[in-house]
Amino acid sequence: MTIVPTGQYANEARGSVMQRNRKADSARMKMSLVEDICNYIRSSPSSDLSLAALERQFKVSRFTIQKSFKELMGISPRKYVEECRILLLKRNLRGGKPMPRAVYDTGYSSQSWLYGDARLKLGMSTASYRKGGDGADIHFQTAQCNMGRLLVAETTHGVCSVNIADNEELLVEALHAEYPRASIVRTDSVRKRIDAILEYFNGKKLVLPFDVDGTDFQRRVWSAILSIPYGQTRTYNEIAKLVGRPGAVRAVANACGANPVPLVIPCHRVVRKDGKIGGYGLGPEKKKALLELESKRVEHS
Protein backbone atom coordinates (compact mmCIF):
# COMPACT_ATOMS: atom_id res chain seq x y z
CA MET A 1 0.00 0.00 0.00
CA THR A 2 1.45 3.38 -1.00
CA ILE A 3 0.72 6.37 1.21
CA VAL A 4 0.49 9.63 -0.69
CA PRO A 5 1.02 12.81 1.37
CA THR A 6 -1.85 15.29 1.19
CA GLY A 7 -2.51 18.83 2.38
CA GLN A 8 0.18 20.47 4.47
CA TYR A 9 2.36 17.36 4.42
CA ALA A 10 2.23 17.22 0.61
CA ASN A 11 3.31 20.85 0.38
CA GLU A 12 6.16 20.24 2.83
CA ALA A 13 7.24 17.16 0.90
CA ARG A 14 7.22 19.06 -2.40
CA GLY A 15 9.15 21.90 -0.77
CA SER A 16 11.74 19.49 0.57
CA VAL A 17 12.21 17.88 -2.85
CA MET A 18 12.52 21.28 -4.53
CA GLN A 19 15.09 22.36 -1.95
CA ARG A 20 17.16 19.21 -2.50
CA ASN A 21 16.97 19.73 -6.26
CA ARG A 22 18.12 23.32 -5.92
CA LYS A 23 21.05 22.23 -3.75
CA ALA A 24 21.98 19.51 -6.25
CA ASP A 25 21.81 21.98 -9.14
CA SER A 26 23.93 24.46 -7.22
CA ALA A 27 26.53 21.78 -6.43
CA ARG A 28 26.69 20.71 -10.10
CA MET A 29 27.10 24.31 -11.25
CA LYS A 30 29.84 24.88 -8.68
CA MET A 31 31.69 21.72 -9.72
CA SER A 32 31.36 22.64 -13.40
CA LEU A 33 32.72 26.13 -12.74
CA VAL A 34 35.74 24.84 -10.83
CA GLU A 35 36.49 22.20 -13.48
CA ASP A 36 36.31 24.84 -16.23
CA ILE A 37 38.66 27.13 -14.31
CA CYS A 38 41.11 24.27 -13.64
CA ASN A 39 41.16 23.37 -17.34
CA TYR A 40 41.69 27.02 -18.27
CA ILE A 41 44.57 27.42 -15.81
CA ARG A 42 46.33 24.27 -17.02
CA SER A 43 45.91 25.22 -20.68
CA SER A 44 46.99 28.87 -20.24
CA PRO A 45 49.81 28.89 -17.67
CA SER A 46 51.44 32.03 -19.04
CA SER A 47 48.21 34.07 -19.04
CA ASP A 48 47.05 36.54 -16.41
CA LEU A 49 45.45 34.15 -13.91
CA SER A 50 44.66 36.56 -11.10
CA LEU A 51 41.22 36.47 -9.47
CA ALA A 52 40.31 39.64 -11.37
CA ALA A 53 41.28 37.99 -14.67
CA LEU A 54 39.35 34.82 -13.84
CA GLU A 55 36.35 36.95 -12.90
CA ARG A 56 36.43 38.61 -16.34
CA GLN A 57 36.99 35.33 -18.16
CA PHE A 58 34.15 33.39 -16.52
CA LYS A 59 31.74 36.26 -15.74
CA VAL A 60 31.54 35.10 -12.12
CA SER A 61 32.46 37.15 -9.06
CA ARG A 62 35.91 36.60 -7.63
CA PHE A 63 34.28 35.90 -4.26
CA THR A 64 32.33 32.98 -5.76
CA ILE A 65 35.44 31.68 -7.51
CA GLN A 66 37.54 31.85 -4.34
CA LYS A 67 34.87 30.25 -2.15
CA SER A 68 34.08 27.44 -4.64
CA PHE A 69 37.78 26.66 -5.12
CA LYS A 70 38.50 26.48 -1.41
CA GLU A 71 35.47 24.26 -0.84
CA LEU A 72 36.09 21.79 -3.66
CA MET A 73 39.86 21.90 -4.12
CA GLY A 74 41.06 22.60 -0.61
CA ILE A 75 43.35 25.39 -1.88
CA SER A 76 42.94 28.88 -3.32
CA PRO A 77 42.98 29.59 -7.08
CA ARG A 78 46.30 31.43 -6.62
CA LYS A 79 47.88 28.36 -5.00
CA TYR A 80 46.49 26.09 -7.72
CA VAL A 81 48.00 28.38 -10.38
CA GLU A 82 51.39 28.24 -8.66
CA GLU A 83 51.31 24.46 -8.27
CA CYS A 84 50.40 24.04 -11.95
CA ARG A 85 53.29 26.30 -12.91
CA ILE A 86 55.70 24.36 -10.70
CA LEU A 87 54.66 21.12 -12.42
CA LEU A 88 55.14 22.76 -15.82
CA LEU A 89 58.57 24.06 -14.77
CA LYS A 90 59.67 20.56 -13.76
CA ARG A 91 58.39 19.11 -17.05
CA ASN A 92 60.25 21.81 -18.96
CA LEU A 93 63.49 21.08 -17.13
CA ARG A 94 63.14 17.32 -17.60
CA GLY A 95 62.51 18.02 -21.28
CA GLY A 96 65.88 19.74 -21.58
CA LYS A 97 64.86 23.42 -21.64
CA PRO A 98 67.42 25.81 -20.15
CA MET A 99 66.43 27.35 -16.84
CA PRO A 100 65.51 30.89 -18.06
CA ARG A 101 63.30 29.55 -20.84
CA ALA A 102 61.70 26.92 -18.59
CA VAL A 103 60.75 29.64 -16.09
CA TYR A 104 59.50 32.07 -18.76
CA ASP A 105 57.20 29.44 -20.25
CA THR A 106 55.46 29.01 -16.90
CA GLY A 107 54.28 32.63 -17.01
CA TYR A 108 56.99 34.30 -14.92
CA SER A 109 59.33 36.91 -16.35
CA SER A 110 62.31 36.05 -14.13
CA GLN A 111 63.68 33.40 -11.78
CA SER A 112 63.12 35.60 -8.71
CA TRP A 113 59.78 33.91 -7.97
CA LEU A 114 61.74 30.80 -6.95
CA TYR A 115 63.36 32.65 -4.10
CA GLY A 116 60.62 34.84 -2.69
CA ASP A 117 58.54 32.30 -0.80
CA ALA A 118 59.82 29.85 1.81
CA ARG A 119 56.74 27.67 1.32
CA LEU A 120 58.44 25.13 -0.81
CA LYS A 121 58.04 25.96 -4.40
CA LEU A 122 60.07 22.94 -5.42
CA GLY A 123 60.27 20.75 -2.38
CA MET A 124 62.19 20.97 0.89
CA SER A 125 61.36 21.57 4.52
CA THR A 126 60.88 25.20 5.46
CA ALA A 127 63.79 25.00 7.89
CA SER A 128 66.14 23.88 5.12
CA TYR A 129 64.63 25.68 2.17
CA ARG A 130 65.36 29.39 2.48
CA LYS A 131 65.70 31.48 -0.67
CA GLY A 132 66.19 28.62 -3.06
CA GLY A 133 68.02 26.36 -0.65
CA ASP A 134 70.41 29.07 0.54
CA GLY A 135 72.60 27.52 3.25
CA ALA A 136 71.30 23.98 2.72
CA ASP A 137 73.78 21.15 2.12
CA ILE A 138 72.49 18.61 -0.40
CA HIS A 139 74.35 15.45 -1.33
CA PHE A 140 73.41 13.42 -4.40
CA GLN A 141 74.47 10.44 -6.43
CA THR A 142 73.28 8.70 -9.58
CA ALA A 143 73.09 5.09 -10.68
CA GLN A 144 71.64 3.01 -13.47
CA CYS A 145 68.30 1.31 -12.78
CA ASN A 146 65.91 -0.68 -14.95
CA MET A 147 64.01 2.51 -15.87
CA GLY A 148 66.95 4.69 -16.82
CA ARG A 149 69.35 6.86 -14.89
CA LEU A 150 68.37 7.35 -11.24
CA LEU A 151 69.28 10.41 -9.17
CA VAL A 152 68.75 10.54 -5.40
CA ALA A 153 69.52 13.62 -3.29
CA GLU A 154 69.30 14.11 0.45
CA THR A 155 69.79 16.65 3.22
CA THR A 156 70.88 15.75 6.74
CA HIS A 157 67.20 15.01 7.48
CA GLY A 158 66.38 12.66 4.61
CA VAL A 159 65.77 12.25 0.90
CA CYS A 160 64.70 15.51 -0.76
CA SER A 161 64.66 14.55 -4.44
CA VAL A 162 64.25 11.41 -6.56
CA ASN A 163 64.29 11.57 -10.34
CA ILE A 164 64.72 9.20 -13.27
CA ALA A 165 65.61 10.14 -16.85
CA ASP A 166 67.68 8.89 -19.77
CA ASN A 167 70.19 11.73 -19.53
CA GLU A 168 72.27 12.19 -16.36
CA GLU A 169 73.19 15.77 -17.27
CA LEU A 170 69.50 16.73 -17.33
CA LEU A 171 68.99 15.09 -13.93
CA VAL A 172 71.78 17.11 -12.35
CA GLU A 173 70.58 20.31 -14.03
CA ALA A 174 67.05 19.74 -12.72
CA LEU A 175 68.37 19.22 -9.18
CA HIS A 176 70.26 22.53 -9.31
CA ALA A 177 67.11 24.19 -10.66
CA GLU A 178 65.10 22.82 -7.76
CA TYR A 179 67.57 24.16 -5.21
CA PRO A 180 69.36 27.01 -7.00
CA ARG A 181 71.08 28.43 -3.91
CA ALA A 182 71.94 25.26 -2.04
CA SER A 183 75.37 23.71 -1.75
CA ILE A 184 75.02 20.60 -3.93
CA VAL A 185 77.74 17.96 -3.90
CA ARG A 186 78.01 14.55 -5.53
CA THR A 187 79.07 11.99 -2.92
CA ASP A 188 78.92 8.27 -2.29
CA SER A 189 77.33 8.91 1.11
CA VAL A 190 73.99 8.74 -0.73
CA ARG A 191 74.79 5.24 -1.94
CA LYS A 192 72.78 3.51 0.79
CA ARG A 193 69.67 5.43 -0.33
CA ILE A 194 70.27 4.43 -3.93
CA ASP A 195 70.83 0.81 -2.92
CA ALA A 196 67.51 0.81 -1.06
CA ILE A 197 65.71 2.05 -4.20
CA LEU A 198 67.51 -0.48 -6.41
CA GLU A 199 66.40 -3.20 -3.98
CA TYR A 200 62.84 -1.89 -4.33
CA PHE A 201 63.08 -2.55 -8.08
CA ASN A 202 64.01 -6.11 -7.15
CA GLY A 203 60.84 -6.51 -5.11
CA LYS A 204 61.71 -5.24 -1.64
CA LYS A 205 59.56 -2.70 0.17
CA LEU A 206 60.97 0.81 0.37
CA VAL A 207 60.99 2.87 3.55
CA LEU A 208 63.28 5.89 3.67
CA PRO A 209 63.34 9.11 5.71
CA PHE A 210 62.54 12.16 3.61
CA ASP A 211 62.91 15.91 3.93
CA VAL A 212 60.06 17.48 1.98
CA ASP A 213 57.25 19.82 2.80
CA GLY A 214 54.36 21.50 1.06
CA THR A 215 50.97 22.98 1.71
CA ASP A 216 48.89 21.49 4.50
CA PHE A 217 46.75 19.78 1.89
CA GLN A 218 49.74 18.29 0.08
CA ARG A 219 51.14 16.90 3.31
CA ARG A 220 47.81 15.25 4.13
CA VAL A 221 47.69 13.69 0.67
CA TRP A 222 51.28 12.41 0.90
CA SER A 223 50.60 10.97 4.34
CA ALA A 224 47.54 9.13 2.99
CA ILE A 225 49.58 7.76 0.09
CA LEU A 226 52.17 6.34 2.48
CA SER A 227 49.41 4.19 3.99
CA ILE A 228 48.74 2.36 0.69
CA PRO A 229 50.20 -1.15 1.01
CA TYR A 230 52.78 -2.45 -1.45
CA GLY A 231 51.07 -3.92 -4.51
CA GLN A 232 47.76 -2.16 -3.90
CA THR A 233 46.21 0.98 -5.36
CA ARG A 234 43.73 3.66 -4.30
CA THR A 235 41.80 6.05 -6.49
CA TYR A 236 42.18 9.82 -6.42
CA ASN A 237 38.58 9.90 -5.14
CA GLU A 238 39.44 7.57 -2.24
CA ILE A 239 42.44 9.68 -1.24
CA ALA A 240 40.31 12.83 -1.42
CA LYS A 241 37.78 11.28 0.98
CA LEU A 242 40.56 10.02 3.24
CA VAL A 243 41.98 13.54 3.69
CA GLY A 244 38.51 14.97 4.33
CA ARG A 245 38.07 16.72 0.97
CA PRO A 246 35.82 14.44 -1.12
CA GLY A 247 35.37 17.09 -3.81
CA ALA A 248 39.07 17.82 -4.18
CA VAL A 249 39.95 15.02 -6.62
CA ARG A 250 41.87 17.31 -8.98
CA ALA A 251 43.78 18.80 -6.07
CA VAL A 252 44.79 15.29 -4.97
CA ALA A 253 46.11 14.60 -8.47
CA ASN A 254 48.00 17.87 -8.35
CA ALA A 255 49.53 16.98 -4.97
CA CYS A 256 50.66 13.64 -6.43
CA GLY A 257 52.32 15.46 -9.30
CA ALA A 258 54.06 17.85 -6.90
CA ASN A 259 55.62 14.98 -4.93
CA PRO A 260 59.41 15.56 -5.11
CA VAL A 261 60.31 12.06 -3.91
CA PRO A 262 58.43 9.53 -6.06
CA LEU A 263 58.96 5.90 -5.01
CA VAL A 264 59.71 7.06 -1.45
CA ILE A 265 56.20 8.56 -1.32
CA PRO A 266 54.58 6.00 -3.67
CA CYS A 267 52.15 8.23 -5.58
CA HIS A 268 52.27 5.73 -8.47
CA ARG A 269 49.77 3.71 -6.38
CA VAL A 270 47.06 6.33 -6.91
CA VAL A 271 44.96 5.71 -10.03
CA ARG A 272 41.84 7.02 -11.69
CA LYS A 273 38.35 5.92 -10.75
CA ASP A 274 37.79 4.42 -14.22
CA GLY A 275 40.77 2.11 -13.74
CA LYS A 276 43.17 4.04 -15.96
CA ILE A 277 46.53 4.84 -14.41
CA GLY A 278 46.37 8.64 -14.74
CA GLY A 279 49.35 10.97 -14.73
CA TYR A 280 52.70 10.65 -12.97
CA GLY A 281 55.62 12.99 -12.38
CA LEU A 282 58.11 10.50 -13.86
CA GLY A 283 55.82 9.73 -16.80
CA PRO A 284 52.84 7.37 -17.28
CA GLU A 285 55.03 4.63 -18.78
CA LYS A 286 57.09 4.43 -15.59
CA LYS A 287 53.93 4.47 -13.48
CA LYS A 288 52.53 1.53 -15.43
CA ALA A 289 55.82 -0.36 -15.09
CA LEU A 290 55.95 0.25 -11.32
CA LEU A 291 52.39 -0.99 -10.82
CA GLU A 292 53.12 -4.11 -12.89
CA LEU A 293 56.32 -4.72 -10.94
CA GLU A 294 54.55 -4.58 -7.59
CA SER A 295 51.62 -6.66 -8.81
CA LYS A 296 53.91 -9.45 -10.04
CA ARG A 297 55.89 -9.46 -6.79
CA VAL A 298 52.68 -9.79 -4.77
CA GLU A 299 51.41 -12.61 -7.00
CA HIS A 300 54.63 -14.59 -6.52
CA SER A 301 55.00 -13.96 -2.82
Image (tube, grey):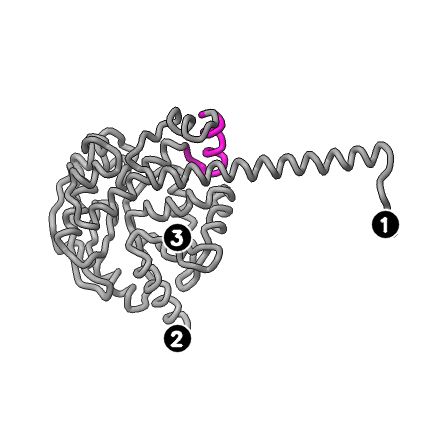
Residue for badge 2? 300
Picture coordinates of residue 51, whole percent (x, y): 39, 27
Query: Closest to the observer: 291 or 129?
Result: 291
Q: Which mark is residue 197?
A: none
Horizontal placement of 30 versus 233: left or right? Answer: right
Which is nearer the eye, 95 or 125?
95
Q: Mark 1 or mark 2, which is nearer to you?
A: 1
Going from N to C along the chain, the mark reached first, 3 or 1, is 1
Residue toward you, 35 or 170? 35
- The dot on residue 2 is 1
Give x and y (percent) for residue 141.
Answer: 15, 54
Q: What distance separates the C-alpha of mark 3 from that of mark 1?
A: 51 Å
Magenta-tinted stretch: 62-76
Which residue is found at the position 39% from the left and 55% from the top?
A: 278
Residue at x-position 52% and y-position 36% = 30
SS state under label 1: loop
Q: Is residue 68 magenta?
A: yes
